[in-house]
Image (tube, rainbow, N blue to C red):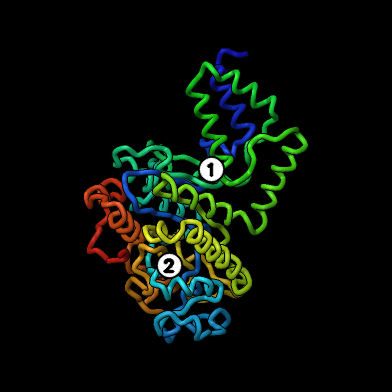
Amino acid sequence: MPKSLTRRTFLSRAAIGCSLAASPLVTPVSFAAAPWDNRLVVIILRGGLDGLDAVRPWGDADFAAARPTLAEGRDPALDLDGYFGLHPGLAPLMPLWQAGELGFVHAVSTPYRNKRSHFDGQDMLEAGLPALDGITRDGWLNRMLQGVPGAVAETTYAIGRESMLLTRGPAPVSRWTPEVDIGLSAQGLMLLELTMQDDPVMAEVMQQAIRLAGQDGDGVVVADEAAMMQDMAADMKALRGTKGHLRIADFAATQLRDTARIASFSLGGWDTHARQAKNLPKSLGTLSQTLLRLRDGLGAAVWGKTTVIAMTEFGRTVRENGTKGTDHGTGGLMLLAGGAVRGGQIYGTWPGLSEAALFDRRDLMPTDDLRRWAAWAMRSSFGIGRDQLERTVFPGLDLGDDPHMLL
Protein backbone atom coordinates (compact mmCIF):
# COMPACT_ATOMS: atom_id res chain seq x y z
CA MET A 1 0.00 0.00 0.00
CA PRO A 2 1.50 3.42 -0.92
CA LYS A 3 2.71 5.44 2.03
CA SER A 4 0.42 8.33 1.08
CA LEU A 5 -2.62 6.08 1.43
CA THR A 6 -2.96 5.35 5.12
CA ARG A 7 -5.19 2.67 6.57
CA ARG A 8 -7.61 5.36 7.72
CA THR A 9 -7.93 7.06 4.32
CA PHE A 10 -8.18 3.68 2.63
CA LEU A 11 -11.03 2.62 4.90
CA SER A 12 -12.70 6.00 4.52
CA ARG A 13 -12.69 5.61 0.78
CA ALA A 14 -13.87 2.03 1.03
CA ALA A 15 -16.80 2.97 3.23
CA ILE A 16 -17.73 5.93 1.04
CA GLY A 17 -17.38 3.83 -2.07
CA CYS A 18 -19.81 1.31 -0.67
CA SER A 19 -22.31 4.00 0.22
CA LEU A 20 -21.33 7.52 -0.74
CA ALA A 21 -24.86 8.80 -0.40
CA ALA A 22 -25.52 7.17 2.94
CA SER A 23 -22.29 8.35 4.48
CA PRO A 24 -22.51 11.16 7.05
CA LEU A 25 -19.96 12.95 4.87
CA VAL A 26 -22.21 13.73 1.90
CA THR A 27 -25.15 16.23 1.50
CA PRO A 28 -28.39 17.95 0.18
CA VAL A 29 -30.55 17.90 3.26
CA SER A 30 -29.00 19.25 6.42
CA PHE A 31 -30.10 18.92 10.03
CA ALA A 32 -28.80 20.21 13.31
CA ALA A 33 -29.43 19.45 16.98
CA ALA A 34 -29.17 22.39 19.36
CA PRO A 35 -30.22 23.63 22.83
CA TRP A 36 -33.68 24.74 21.68
CA ASP A 37 -37.04 23.08 21.36
CA ASN A 38 -38.13 24.96 18.22
CA ARG A 39 -37.35 23.66 14.73
CA LEU A 40 -36.36 25.42 11.52
CA VAL A 41 -36.52 23.96 8.01
CA VAL A 42 -34.91 25.84 5.11
CA ILE A 43 -35.85 24.80 1.57
CA ILE A 44 -33.94 26.24 -1.39
CA LEU A 45 -36.09 26.35 -4.54
CA ARG A 46 -33.48 26.14 -7.31
CA GLY A 47 -34.17 27.72 -10.69
CA GLY A 48 -36.03 30.91 -9.82
CA LEU A 49 -39.62 30.38 -8.67
CA ASP A 50 -42.13 32.65 -10.41
CA GLY A 51 -43.72 34.13 -7.31
CA LEU A 52 -46.19 36.12 -9.41
CA ASP A 53 -47.65 32.86 -10.65
CA ALA A 54 -47.45 30.95 -7.37
CA VAL A 55 -49.24 33.71 -5.44
CA ARG A 56 -51.10 35.73 -8.06
CA PRO A 57 -51.82 39.46 -7.52
CA TRP A 58 -55.33 39.41 -8.98
CA GLY A 59 -56.06 42.78 -7.42
CA ASP A 60 -53.35 44.49 -9.46
CA ALA A 61 -54.87 45.94 -12.63
CA ASP A 62 -51.64 45.37 -14.59
CA PHE A 63 -51.34 41.66 -13.83
CA ALA A 64 -53.67 40.24 -16.48
CA ALA A 65 -52.34 42.60 -19.15
CA ALA A 66 -48.75 41.49 -18.56
CA ARG A 67 -49.71 37.80 -18.64
CA PRO A 68 -52.46 37.13 -21.15
CA THR A 69 -51.83 33.36 -20.98
CA LEU A 70 -50.54 32.78 -17.46
CA ALA A 71 -53.21 34.93 -15.80
CA GLU A 72 -56.07 32.85 -17.17
CA GLY A 73 -58.35 30.79 -14.97
CA ARG A 74 -58.89 32.76 -11.78
CA ASP A 75 -60.42 30.44 -9.17
CA PRO A 76 -62.44 32.11 -6.37
CA ALA A 77 -61.85 29.02 -4.21
CA LEU A 78 -58.13 29.86 -4.12
CA ASP A 79 -58.58 33.48 -3.06
CA LEU A 80 -56.31 34.36 -0.14
CA ASP A 81 -57.19 37.88 0.94
CA GLY A 82 -59.22 39.49 -1.83
CA TYR A 83 -56.09 40.72 -3.61
CA PHE A 84 -53.85 37.64 -3.93
CA GLY A 85 -54.78 34.09 -4.87
CA LEU A 86 -53.01 30.73 -4.96
CA HIS A 87 -51.91 28.92 -8.10
CA PRO A 88 -53.95 25.70 -8.48
CA GLY A 89 -50.73 23.72 -7.99
CA LEU A 90 -50.65 24.97 -4.40
CA ALA A 91 -54.33 24.22 -3.76
CA PRO A 92 -53.49 21.32 -1.39
CA LEU A 93 -51.94 23.92 0.92
CA MET A 94 -55.14 25.96 1.26
CA PRO A 95 -56.07 24.17 4.53
CA LEU A 96 -52.74 25.33 5.98
CA TRP A 97 -53.56 28.92 4.99
CA GLN A 98 -56.99 28.64 6.57
CA ALA A 99 -55.43 27.20 9.75
CA GLY A 100 -52.98 30.10 9.96
CA GLU A 101 -50.01 27.81 9.23
CA LEU A 102 -49.06 29.21 5.80
CA GLY A 103 -47.99 32.68 4.71
CA PHE A 104 -45.97 34.40 2.02
CA VAL A 105 -43.60 37.35 1.67
CA HIS A 106 -43.88 39.07 -1.71
CA ALA A 107 -41.38 41.36 -3.46
CA VAL A 108 -38.26 40.18 -1.60
CA SER A 109 -34.78 39.56 -2.94
CA THR A 110 -31.15 39.14 -1.97
CA PRO A 111 -28.89 42.08 -2.91
CA TYR A 112 -28.10 40.28 -6.19
CA ARG A 113 -28.99 42.43 -9.21
CA ASN A 114 -28.91 42.63 -13.00
CA LYS A 115 -26.82 39.63 -14.11
CA ARG A 116 -29.55 37.12 -13.27
CA SER A 117 -27.28 34.06 -13.24
CA HIS A 118 -28.60 30.98 -11.45
CA PHE A 119 -25.13 30.11 -10.15
CA ASP A 120 -24.31 33.56 -8.80
CA GLY A 121 -27.84 34.06 -7.51
CA GLN A 122 -27.83 30.78 -5.60
CA ASP A 123 -24.35 31.43 -4.22
CA MET A 124 -25.46 34.79 -2.84
CA LEU A 125 -28.67 33.30 -1.48
CA GLU A 126 -26.81 30.56 0.41
CA ALA A 127 -23.77 32.63 1.40
CA GLY A 128 -26.01 35.39 2.75
CA LEU A 129 -23.56 38.13 1.79
CA PRO A 130 -24.28 41.66 0.50
CA ALA A 131 -22.13 40.94 -2.57
CA LEU A 132 -20.24 38.05 -4.12
CA ASP A 133 -16.61 38.29 -3.03
CA GLY A 134 -15.26 35.06 -4.53
CA ILE A 135 -13.68 34.21 -1.18
CA THR A 136 -16.33 33.30 1.39
CA ARG A 137 -17.14 29.63 1.14
CA ASP A 138 -19.38 29.15 4.15
CA GLY A 139 -23.13 29.56 4.33
CA TRP A 140 -25.31 31.67 6.59
CA LEU A 141 -26.88 28.69 8.31
CA ASN A 142 -23.46 27.31 9.22
CA ARG A 143 -22.33 30.73 10.49
CA MET A 144 -25.35 30.82 12.76
CA LEU A 145 -24.47 27.37 14.12
CA GLN A 146 -20.89 28.45 14.81
CA GLY A 147 -22.23 30.74 17.53
CA VAL A 148 -24.37 28.09 19.23
CA PRO A 149 -22.71 26.53 22.30
CA GLY A 150 -22.87 22.76 22.28
CA ALA A 151 -24.02 22.37 18.68
CA VAL A 152 -23.11 18.92 17.37
CA ALA A 153 -23.37 17.16 14.02
CA GLU A 154 -26.83 15.86 14.85
CA THR A 155 -28.05 19.45 15.26
CA THR A 156 -28.08 19.95 11.48
CA TYR A 157 -28.45 17.54 8.57
CA ALA A 158 -27.93 17.97 4.85
CA ILE A 159 -30.07 15.83 2.53
CA GLY A 160 -29.43 15.27 -1.15
CA ARG A 161 -26.67 14.73 -3.70
CA GLU A 162 -25.37 18.28 -3.84
CA SER A 163 -23.16 20.07 -1.36
CA MET A 164 -25.18 23.02 -0.10
CA LEU A 165 -23.20 26.21 0.47
CA LEU A 166 -25.94 27.13 2.95
CA THR A 167 -24.64 24.60 5.51
CA ARG A 168 -20.97 24.55 4.56
CA GLY A 169 -18.45 25.77 7.13
CA PRO A 170 -16.63 24.86 10.35
CA ALA A 171 -19.78 23.97 12.34
CA PRO A 172 -20.49 20.21 12.25
CA VAL A 173 -23.32 19.08 9.97
CA SER A 174 -24.61 15.55 9.36
CA ARG A 175 -25.55 14.55 5.83
CA TRP A 176 -27.84 12.03 4.21
CA THR A 177 -29.11 11.39 0.71
CA PRO A 178 -31.98 9.10 -0.33
CA GLU A 179 -30.40 7.79 -3.54
CA VAL A 180 -28.22 4.98 -2.26
CA ASP A 181 -28.07 2.99 0.95
CA ILE A 182 -25.12 1.06 2.29
CA GLY A 183 -24.78 -2.17 0.38
CA LEU A 184 -22.41 -4.74 1.83
CA SER A 185 -22.35 -8.46 1.93
CA ALA A 186 -22.32 -10.03 5.38
CA GLN A 187 -18.68 -10.97 4.78
CA GLY A 188 -17.84 -7.41 3.73
CA LEU A 189 -19.38 -5.96 6.86
CA MET A 190 -17.51 -8.47 9.03
CA LEU A 191 -14.23 -7.55 7.31
CA LEU A 192 -14.79 -3.85 7.94
CA GLU A 193 -15.63 -4.46 11.59
CA LEU A 194 -12.51 -6.58 12.10
CA THR A 195 -10.30 -4.06 10.34
CA MET A 196 -11.62 -1.14 12.38
CA GLN A 197 -11.82 -2.80 15.78
CA ASP A 198 -8.63 -1.03 16.89
CA ASP A 199 -9.65 2.31 15.38
CA PRO A 200 -12.54 3.75 17.43
CA VAL A 201 -12.77 6.92 15.31
CA MET A 202 -13.32 5.07 12.06
CA ALA A 203 -15.57 2.54 13.76
CA GLU A 204 -17.80 5.37 14.95
CA VAL A 205 -17.92 6.92 11.45
CA MET A 206 -18.95 3.61 9.92
CA GLN A 207 -21.60 2.99 12.58
CA GLN A 208 -23.00 6.48 11.96
CA ALA A 209 -23.19 5.75 8.23
CA ILE A 210 -25.02 2.50 8.89
CA ARG A 211 -27.38 4.18 11.34
CA LEU A 212 -28.26 6.98 8.92
CA ALA A 213 -28.69 4.58 6.01
CA GLY A 214 -31.13 2.50 8.01
CA GLN A 215 -33.26 5.35 9.31
CA ASP A 216 -35.35 5.60 6.15
CA GLY A 217 -36.63 2.08 6.71
CA ASP A 218 -34.29 0.24 4.30
CA GLY A 219 -32.09 -2.65 5.21
CA VAL A 220 -28.38 -1.93 5.34
CA VAL A 221 -26.75 -5.29 4.77
CA VAL A 222 -27.84 -7.58 1.94
CA ALA A 223 -27.07 -11.20 1.36
CA ASP A 224 -25.33 -11.03 -2.02
CA GLU A 225 -24.18 -8.68 -4.76
CA ALA A 226 -27.25 -9.24 -6.94
CA ALA A 227 -29.62 -8.29 -4.13
CA MET A 228 -27.45 -5.29 -3.29
CA MET A 229 -27.61 -3.99 -6.88
CA GLN A 230 -31.36 -4.61 -6.97
CA ASP A 231 -31.91 -2.54 -3.81
CA MET A 232 -29.71 0.29 -5.09
CA ALA A 233 -31.60 0.35 -8.41
CA ALA A 234 -34.90 0.55 -6.52
CA ASP A 235 -33.62 3.53 -4.55
CA MET A 236 -32.56 5.34 -7.71
CA LYS A 237 -35.90 4.62 -9.41
CA ALA A 238 -37.82 5.97 -6.42
CA LEU A 239 -35.77 9.15 -6.46
CA ARG A 240 -36.22 9.70 -10.20
CA GLY A 241 -39.95 9.15 -9.89
CA THR A 242 -42.31 10.88 -7.52
CA LYS A 243 -40.98 9.53 -4.24
CA GLY A 244 -37.62 11.23 -3.82
CA HIS A 245 -39.00 14.39 -2.22
CA LEU A 246 -41.25 12.29 0.03
CA ARG A 247 -38.30 10.24 1.28
CA ILE A 248 -36.51 13.48 2.05
CA ALA A 249 -39.55 14.79 3.96
CA ASP A 250 -39.89 11.50 5.87
CA PHE A 251 -36.23 11.44 6.86
CA ALA A 252 -36.28 15.11 7.85
CA ALA A 253 -39.35 14.55 10.02
CA THR A 254 -37.72 11.56 11.72
CA GLN A 255 -34.62 13.58 12.63
CA LEU A 256 -36.57 16.64 13.74
CA ARG A 257 -38.74 14.54 16.03
CA ASP A 258 -35.52 13.34 17.63
CA THR A 259 -32.46 15.51 18.34
CA ALA A 260 -32.22 17.57 15.16
CA ARG A 261 -33.44 21.15 15.32
CA ILE A 262 -32.53 22.49 11.88
CA ALA A 263 -32.96 20.89 8.46
CA SER A 264 -32.19 22.19 5.00
CA PHE A 265 -32.59 20.77 1.52
CA SER A 266 -33.36 21.91 -2.00
CA LEU A 267 -36.02 21.26 -4.61
CA GLY A 268 -35.32 21.91 -8.29
CA GLY A 269 -37.46 22.46 -11.36
CA TRP A 270 -38.32 26.18 -11.06
CA ASP A 271 -36.71 27.50 -14.27
CA THR A 272 -39.83 28.04 -16.40
CA HIS A 273 -38.68 29.78 -19.61
CA ALA A 274 -41.25 27.95 -21.76
CA ARG A 275 -44.65 26.28 -21.35
CA GLN A 276 -44.91 27.49 -17.80
CA ALA A 277 -48.60 26.65 -17.49
CA LYS A 278 -47.69 23.00 -18.06
CA ASN A 279 -44.40 22.79 -16.17
CA LEU A 280 -44.87 24.92 -13.05
CA PRO A 281 -47.78 22.90 -11.62
CA LYS A 282 -45.49 19.87 -11.35
CA SER A 283 -42.98 21.72 -9.18
CA LEU A 284 -45.69 23.37 -7.10
CA GLY A 285 -47.25 19.94 -6.58
CA THR A 286 -43.92 18.57 -5.38
CA LEU A 287 -43.53 21.46 -2.94
CA SER A 288 -47.09 20.97 -1.65
CA GLN A 289 -46.56 17.24 -1.15
CA THR A 290 -43.25 17.84 0.63
CA LEU A 291 -44.73 20.31 3.09
CA LEU A 292 -47.76 18.18 3.88
CA ARG A 293 -45.64 15.03 4.25
CA LEU A 294 -43.30 16.90 6.60
CA ARG A 295 -46.25 18.14 8.67
CA ASP A 296 -47.74 14.67 8.94
CA GLY A 297 -44.38 13.12 9.79
CA LEU A 298 -43.64 15.64 12.53
CA GLY A 299 -46.99 15.24 14.23
CA ALA A 300 -49.06 18.04 15.72
CA ALA A 301 -46.83 18.70 18.74
CA VAL A 302 -43.55 19.12 16.84
CA TRP A 303 -45.21 20.82 13.84
CA GLY A 304 -46.48 23.41 16.30
CA LYS A 305 -42.86 24.31 17.10
CA THR A 306 -41.69 24.30 13.48
CA THR A 307 -41.00 27.11 11.01
CA VAL A 308 -40.42 26.30 7.33
CA ILE A 309 -39.02 28.93 4.99
CA ALA A 310 -38.77 28.28 1.25
CA MET A 311 -36.52 30.65 -0.70
CA THR A 312 -35.41 31.07 -4.31
CA GLU A 313 -32.46 32.87 -5.92
CA PHE A 314 -34.58 35.43 -7.80
CA GLY A 315 -38.05 35.95 -9.24
CA ARG A 316 -39.06 36.08 -12.88
CA THR A 317 -40.10 38.73 -15.38
CA VAL A 318 -43.50 40.35 -14.96
CA ARG A 319 -44.39 39.90 -18.62
CA GLU A 320 -44.64 36.44 -20.08
CA ASN A 321 -42.38 35.74 -23.05
CA GLY A 322 -43.04 34.45 -26.56
CA THR A 323 -42.77 30.80 -25.49
CA LYS A 324 -45.48 31.24 -22.83
CA GLY A 325 -42.97 31.25 -20.02
CA THR A 326 -41.05 33.83 -18.01
CA ASP A 327 -37.39 34.81 -17.90
CA HIS A 328 -34.98 35.47 -15.02
CA GLY A 329 -36.10 38.41 -12.93
CA THR A 330 -35.41 40.10 -9.60
CA GLY A 331 -38.11 40.47 -6.93
CA GLY A 332 -39.42 37.12 -5.75
CA LEU A 333 -41.46 35.25 -3.17
CA MET A 334 -40.72 33.55 0.14
CA LEU A 335 -43.00 30.87 1.56
CA LEU A 336 -43.59 30.50 5.31
CA ALA A 337 -45.18 27.39 6.78
CA GLY A 338 -45.44 25.58 10.11
CA GLY A 339 -47.36 25.59 13.32
CA ALA A 340 -45.08 28.30 14.71
CA VAL A 341 -45.84 30.67 11.80
CA ARG A 342 -48.28 33.55 12.09
CA GLY A 343 -49.86 32.56 8.78
CA GLY A 344 -52.99 33.44 6.88
CA GLN A 345 -51.47 36.66 5.55
CA ILE A 346 -49.24 38.10 2.82
CA TYR A 347 -46.23 39.92 4.25
CA GLY A 348 -44.11 42.55 2.59
CA THR A 349 -44.72 45.82 0.77
CA TRP A 350 -46.38 45.38 -2.61
CA PRO A 351 -44.81 47.75 -5.20
CA GLY A 352 -47.36 47.31 -7.99
CA LEU A 353 -46.91 46.11 -11.56
CA SER A 354 -47.19 49.32 -13.56
CA GLU A 355 -44.21 49.73 -15.85
CA ALA A 356 -42.91 52.71 -13.90
CA ALA A 357 -42.95 50.63 -10.70
CA LEU A 358 -40.89 47.76 -12.12
CA PHE A 359 -37.18 47.10 -11.61
CA ASP A 360 -35.43 47.87 -14.92
CA ARG A 361 -38.97 48.24 -16.32
CA ARG A 362 -39.21 44.43 -16.51
CA ASP A 363 -39.10 42.79 -13.05
CA LEU A 364 -41.03 42.93 -9.80
CA MET A 365 -39.34 45.63 -7.72
CA PRO A 366 -37.78 44.24 -4.50
CA THR A 367 -39.06 46.16 -1.49
CA ASP A 368 -37.24 44.18 1.20
CA ASP A 369 -34.15 42.06 1.77
CA LEU A 370 -34.96 38.34 1.82
CA ARG A 371 -32.10 37.83 4.30
CA ARG A 372 -33.92 39.98 6.85
CA TRP A 373 -36.84 37.54 6.93
CA ALA A 374 -34.50 34.56 7.28
CA ALA A 375 -32.74 36.37 10.13
CA TRP A 376 -36.01 37.05 11.94
CA ALA A 377 -36.98 33.40 11.54
CA MET A 378 -33.79 32.45 13.43
CA ARG A 379 -34.10 35.22 15.99
CA SER A 380 -37.74 34.43 16.76
CA SER A 381 -37.17 30.66 16.79
CA PHE A 382 -33.88 30.44 18.66
CA GLY A 383 -33.24 33.82 20.25
CA ILE A 384 -30.13 34.50 18.15
CA GLY A 385 -28.77 37.94 19.05
CA ARG A 386 -29.30 40.91 16.75
CA ASP A 387 -25.59 41.69 16.74
CA GLN A 388 -24.68 38.14 15.68
CA LEU A 389 -27.25 38.18 12.90
CA GLU A 390 -26.24 41.59 11.53
CA ARG A 391 -22.46 41.17 11.82
CA THR A 392 -21.73 37.46 11.43
CA VAL A 393 -24.62 35.53 9.94
CA PHE A 394 -25.62 38.24 7.44
CA PRO A 395 -22.79 40.79 7.44
CA GLY A 396 -24.03 44.33 6.89
CA LEU A 397 -27.72 43.47 7.24
CA ASP A 398 -30.09 45.92 8.92
CA LEU A 399 -32.46 43.65 10.81
CA GLY A 400 -35.05 46.40 11.18
CA ASP A 401 -38.28 45.99 13.11
CA ASP A 402 -39.75 42.64 14.06
CA PRO A 403 -42.23 41.62 11.32
CA HIS A 404 -44.00 39.33 13.84
CA MET A 405 -43.99 36.46 11.37
CA LEU A 406 -43.94 33.84 14.16
CA LEU A 407 -46.31 33.28 17.04
Instruction: Please name the residue that numbered disc 2 is placed on.
Output: 333
- Rendered position, 177 above or below 375: above
Quarter containing the C terminus: bottom left
- The residue sitting at 54% across, 70% down in the picture is 326
Q: Amino acid at mark 2?
A: Leu
In the image, taking residue 330 as reference, residue 236 lies left or right, namely right
- The residue sitting at 36% across, 68% down in the picture is 366
**Nearer-the-camera pick, 236 or 350:** 236
Label 1: how many Cα within 10 Å (few below 14, some 14–19, many 20+): many
Residue at mark 2 to residue at mark 1: CA–CA distance: 28 Å
- The residue sitting at 67% across, 47% down in the picture is 235
Please state the horizontal and vertical placement of residue 285, each as a whole percent of the image. 57, 67
- The residue sitting at 55% across, 64% down in the picture is 289
First in sequence: mark 2 vs mark 1: 1
In the image, taking residue 281 as reference, residue 301 lies left or right, namely left
Q: Amino acid at mark 1?
A: Trp
Instruction: Tell me if I can see residue 83 in this picture.
Output: yes
**Nearer-the-camera pick, 122 or 93:** 93
Helix, strand or loop at mark 2: strand
- Rendered position, 44 above or below 139: below
Instruction: Please name the residue that numbered disc 1 is placed on.
Output: 176
Please state the horizontal and vertical placement of residue 273, each as a whole percent of the image. 58, 67
- Of marks 2 and 1, the one in the foreground: 1
Label 2: how many Cα within 10 Å (few below 14, some 14–19, many 20+): many
Please state the horizontal and vertical placement of residue 389, each as a whole percent of the image. 27, 50
In the image, taking residue 161 as reference, residue 309 lies left or right, namely left
Instruction: Tell me if I can see residue 365 in this picture.
Output: no
- Rendered position, 188 above or below 123: above
Corner quadrant of residue 347: bottom left
**Nearer-the-camera pick, 76 or 99:** 99
Residue 15: give its label.
Answer: none
Quarter containing the N terminus: top right
